[in-house]
Image (cartoon, rainbow, N blue to C red):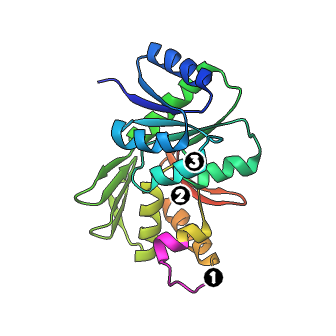
Amino acid sequence: MATKILAADDDRNICELLKLYLENEGYEVKCAQNGAEAVDMFKLYEPDLVLLDVMMPRKDGWQVCREIREQSQKPVIMLSAKGEVFDKVLGLELGADDYIIKPFDMKEVAARIKAVLRRSQTRDVDESEEVIRYDNLEISKRKYELKLAGKVVEVPPKELQLLYFLASNCNRVFTRDQLLDKVWGFDYLGDSRTVDVHVKRLREKLDGVSNKWSLKTVWGVGYKFELL
């Protein structure tokens, strides 16, 4: 079965160009002309990946990305004429997997799609056991157990929860406040620097375990679990 892509852009010519090129690459493609239509089509079509323009009528790409992330972790690639760092960071914070600046080359779009799909398929999550596995890494949320290169490593609950959350959302950047919300909860009253301390301790445990992933600092933003 062909990989399904939803392309959302209010520029009909861009939609038609994406559809023509990507179908020639073997993908199945449907298009949406505005944000509200994109949300509806995402629910009905259940695509494997979304190409999402930022500036669209009815709902912009930021809002569409938020709504997609409320119900799915399917890959999202933002398309925008805005190339400022702020816009790229905002897209990544909202859960986008990549950000392509217009005007773009179709070969680059196809290459980015392949790379994002490859990363999304690498993660092996056993939902019933709540286990995540990467190269030399296994995190069991149910057992509260961390294995590195097959050996169980002692780790405090909050460190394990933090690592599990980041690894569950690989290549997505989260601010310290977002991590406090997701891992520590709304009622946490402590300093956001506690995130830095937990990341530092995790890095000490994870140092040298694998060259296929890393716990990375995105300066001025926060942290992410990155597949290399």
The alpha-carbon separation of the residues under discs 1 and 3 comes to 35 Å
* Residue plotted at (57% across, 86% down): 189
Magenta stretch holds residue 44: no
- Position of residue 215 measured from the top left corner of the image (x, y, whole percent): 55, 56
Q: How many marks?
A: 3
Task: Report the residue that reaches farthest toward the front.
Answer: 58
| Circle 2/circle 3 CB separation < 8 Å | no
| Residue for badge 2 | 207
Q: Nearer the viewer, mark 2 or mark 3?
A: 3
The amino acid type, in three-letter code, at marker 1 is Asp
| Vertical relation: 147 (above or below) 83 | below
Q: CA distance from mark 1 to mark 2?
A: 26 Å
Q: Secondary structure at mark 3?
A: loop
SS at badge 2: loop
The quarter of the picture where residue 138 lies is: bottom left
Closer to the camera in the image, 207 or 115? 115
Under mark 2, the amino acid is Asp
Specify which label sits upstream in the sequence, 2 or 3.
3
Q: CA distance from mark 2 to mark 3?
A: 43 Å
